[in-house]
Image: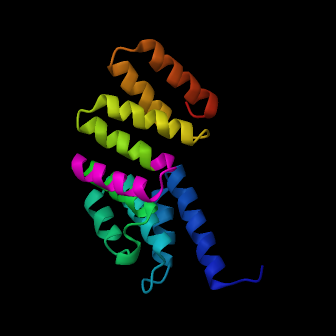
Amino acid sequence: LAPSEHGAGLLRQARIAQLLQRGNFAEAERLVESEPVEPRDPGTILLSSALALAQRKAPLAQLRLDALPSALREEPQALIVRSDIARALGHAEAALVAAERGIARAPRSAALFERRGLARELLADPAGARADMERAAALDRHSDGALLSLGRLRRSAGDLTGAVLAFHEATQRQPDDA
């Protein structure tokens, strides 16, 4: 409860994540830069990489992710970001490998199943992509991302009823998300 450098860092990371989700990239970048460069906290490194990716700067995101200590590069959160960067760079196979390595370490991670599904979609494996999106939606009953992707996949396959059901469930989970 006492003020501490560690607590202040965690609060800064929470604020960066909040700004990133709201699309306020400039303010999020300002907070990232306000942290001392050496040693930069791994959580801030991941957030700064995700921030660059959200701004469609995949090479910068990769550069930032590479600053992560090697011992942490196989952590599930890092593999989520690595998969996202690989997809943004058009490297679907690398995205799939990163997601699969993450699933091996965190077999109940909805985010990793969603990433694997997105990679499988790029690799023209719609059945695998649908299965992963269904698994992601079942693992995380609050998020709508996997359901939106699942609805899109079902619509592309001509399963309009399945698509409508997936989109409907997504709106039930996140009614404020148009």
Residue at horizontal 48 percent and vertical 37 percent from the top: 135
Residue 37 percent location from the top left of the image: 42, 83
Residue 64, above or below 6: above
Between residues 30 and 151, which one lies in front from this camera angle? 151
From the image, which quarter does the C terminus lie in?
A: top right
From the image, which quarter does the N terminus lie in?
A: bottom right
Between residues 25 and 52, which one lies in front from this camera angle? 52
Horizontal arrangement in the rendering, residue 102 relative to residue 96 (left or right): right
Residue 150 percent location from the top left of the image: 43, 29
Magenta highlight on residue 109:
yes
Q: Name which quarter of the figure residue 50 lies in.
A: bottom left
Horizontal arrangement in the rendering, residue 27 relative to residue 74 (left or right): right
The colour style of the image is rainbow
Residue 129 percent location from the top left of the image: 35, 34
Which span of residues is magenta-colored?
Answer: 92-111
Residue 132 percent location from the top left of the image: 41, 37
Residue at horizontal 50 percent and vertical 46 percent from the top: 110
Residue at horizontal 49 percent and vertical 32 percent from the top: 147
Give the mark count: 0
Can residue 90 be seen here? The reply is no
Main secondary structure found in the magenta portion = helix
Residue at horizontal 33 percent and vertical 19 percent from the top: 157
